[in-house]
Image (tube, helix red, strand yellow):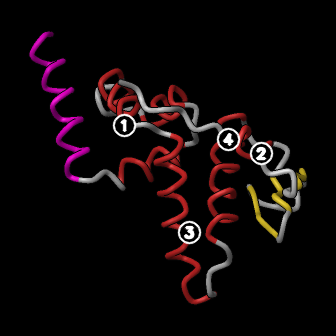
Amino acid sequence: MREHRYHPWRILRGLPHITLRWSAAVARGRVDGHTITLHPLLTQAERRSTLAHELVHLERGPAPPHLAAREELIVEEIAARRLVGLDDLADAIVWHDGHAHDGMAEDLWVDRAILLARIRALRPDERAYIEQIVARREGSA
């Protein structure tokens, strides 16, 4: 059974105290207090991925400066898990034979960074699950 899909835009709509701004002054996105700012030239997949990332920052609150790099990795992993369900990832890997990350990201409607964060963060049981699906496909080919 497929996991429930995460919709960052729906989440944002449910947070009336949060303001969304568009500005070319940010590289991709930023959270400042109760404002999320996104770059206006992001693709739809980049907007979705960046918004999910910034929503996680909102939930977690600010990190101490000396932990900023570690916090970014954690936030990216959380956003990736929310945006890319395991069954969808397995389907993309099978469809693209585990290659063509840009194509997989496009199919999953995320940016490449979110896709790679999801793959990097796979737990051993998730890897085994995906390997089972790939082996089943190869056995039926």
Circle 3 sits in a helix, a strand or a loop, which is it? helix
Q: Nearer the viewer's eye, disc 2 or disc 1? A: 2
Q: What is the spatial separation of the Cα atoms under label 2 and label 3, in whole angstroms? A: 24 Å
> Label 4 sits on what residue type?
Arg
> Is 11 on the left or on the right of 93, as rendered?
right
Q: Residue at x 24, y 35 (%)?
A: 130
Whichever of callouts 2 and 3 sits on the residue coming sooner in the sequence is: 2
Q: Is residue 33 magenta?
A: no
- Is tag 4's residue or tag 2's residue first in the polypeptide sequence? 2
> Which residue shows up at 47% across the image and 57% down it?
77
Of labels 4 and 3, earlier in sequence is 4
Judged left or right of residue 85, residue 68 is right
Mark 4 touches mark 1? (CB < 8 Å): no
Q: Marks 4 and 1: which is nearer the front?
A: 1
Within 10 Å of disc 4 (Cα), the crowding (few <14, some 14-19, many 20+) is some
Which residue in the protein does label 3 denote? 72
In the rendered image, which quarter is residue 132 located in? top left
Of the two numbered discs 2 and 1 on the same chain, state the one appearing first in sequence.
Answer: 2
Q: Nearer the viewer, residue 118 or 28?
A: 118
Mark 1 residue type: Leu
The amino acid type found where label 3 is placed reads Glu
